[in-house]
Image: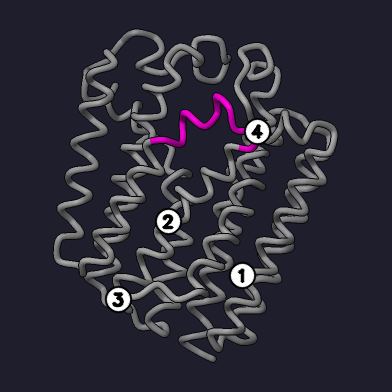
Amino acid sequence: MTKLALYFRLIRADKPIGILLLLWPTLWALWMASGGEPDPVIVLIFVLGTALMRSAGCAINDYADRDFDKHVKRTVDRPLTSGRIKGWEALMVAAVLAIVSFLLILPLNTLTKQLSVLAVIVAGTYPYFKRFFAIPQAYLGIAFGFGIPMAFAAVQDTVPSVAWWLLVANVFWAVAYDTEYAMVDRDDDLKIGIRTSAITFGRFDVAAVMLCYGVALGIDLVCGWMLGLRWWFVGGVAVAAGIALYHYTLIRERDRMRCFAAFRHNNWLGAALFAGVALDYALG
């Protein structure tokens, strides 16, 4: 396998689910901040920036976890863990991607650039929270949702309170879907001492996932209503709730592969919410 192919595996270019889970909240925010008429240039900047920063985050995550991943069945064959690339290469890839991402936002206002610095700090420090924080998925939710305040800043040159509430909703959504993900690796994580929400919640893990879905969708519903969104949006939230209930059927037996399927299926939950937002502005 060539170096370029290994770098593509490092940044999970073959697994776009991570990009989508970052992208959907960013798109909700862009549409909400602009009243359903976002500037296409700003949308393009955020789409490309989201893909680049998620890829950089994967490289940083693998560098931070390179010793732990050797003991996890799902990650033992990653390029860095298996020794096919070096640690400095992963850091180089992350740095290049982060720099290109920052260059993309140069046309945007100062507030957006300032928030981008915070976004990089959060993304870069997340992998280390698993060493001591009982629910690192909450911190992941901040990292995965930071496109929300940045989107409002880019469009409105301010970050209203509703944007921060949408970020809170994203934290609960991230705890839900990443707990499903953590349920896949629970046995390995217990052996190596990694902290995850699946371990912290214990036998209440399924109930905690469903509660987080409920809180996230409830906050989203209130925020959308405050912004003037009505029945198409409510329909999108209802579809998302139905998807969350479907995830319950996948995770209730705690089967590893079904939990992983539930995690991946969150793309459709995010898509349903975006469809509700977009349709309400277009047709409401």
Where is residue 168, by image quadrant? bottom right
Residue denoted by label 3: 157
Separation of residues labelled 3 and 1 (CA atoms): 22 Å
Q: Are marks 2 and 1 in contact (CB under 8 Å)?
A: no
Of tags 2 and 1, the one toward the viewer is 2
**Lower position in the chain sequence, tag 2 or tag 1:** 2
Instruction: Report helix, strand or loop for mark 2.
Output: loop
The percent position of residue 111, horizontal first and vertical second, equals: 27, 66
**Lower position in the chain sequence, tag 3 or tag 1:** 3
Instruction: Report helix, strand or loop for mark 1.
Output: helix
Where is residue 170, by image quadrant? bottom right
Task: Check residue 134 in the rendering and tell me which mark sits there, or answer none.
Answer: 4
Circle 3 packing at 10 Å, graded few (<14), some (14-19), many (20+), is some
Name the residue: 48% across, 70% down: 163
Outermost residue to the bottom: 284
Separation of residues labelled 2 and 3 (CA atoms): 15 Å
Residue bounds of the magenta highlight: 125-135
Residue denoted by label 2: 146
**Lower position in the chain sequence, tag 1 or tag 4:** 4
Of tags 1 and 4, the one toward the viewer is 4
Task: Check residue 241 in the rendering and tell me which mark sits there, or answer none.
Answer: none
Q: From what the image shows, is residue 29 above or below residue 126?
A: below
> Is 130 one of the magenta-colored residues?
yes
Circle 1 packing at 10 Å, graded few (<14), some (14-19), many (20+), is many
User: What amino acid type is highlighted by mark number 1?
Assistant: Asp
Residue denoted by label 1: 220
> Is 180 one of the magenta-colored residues?
no
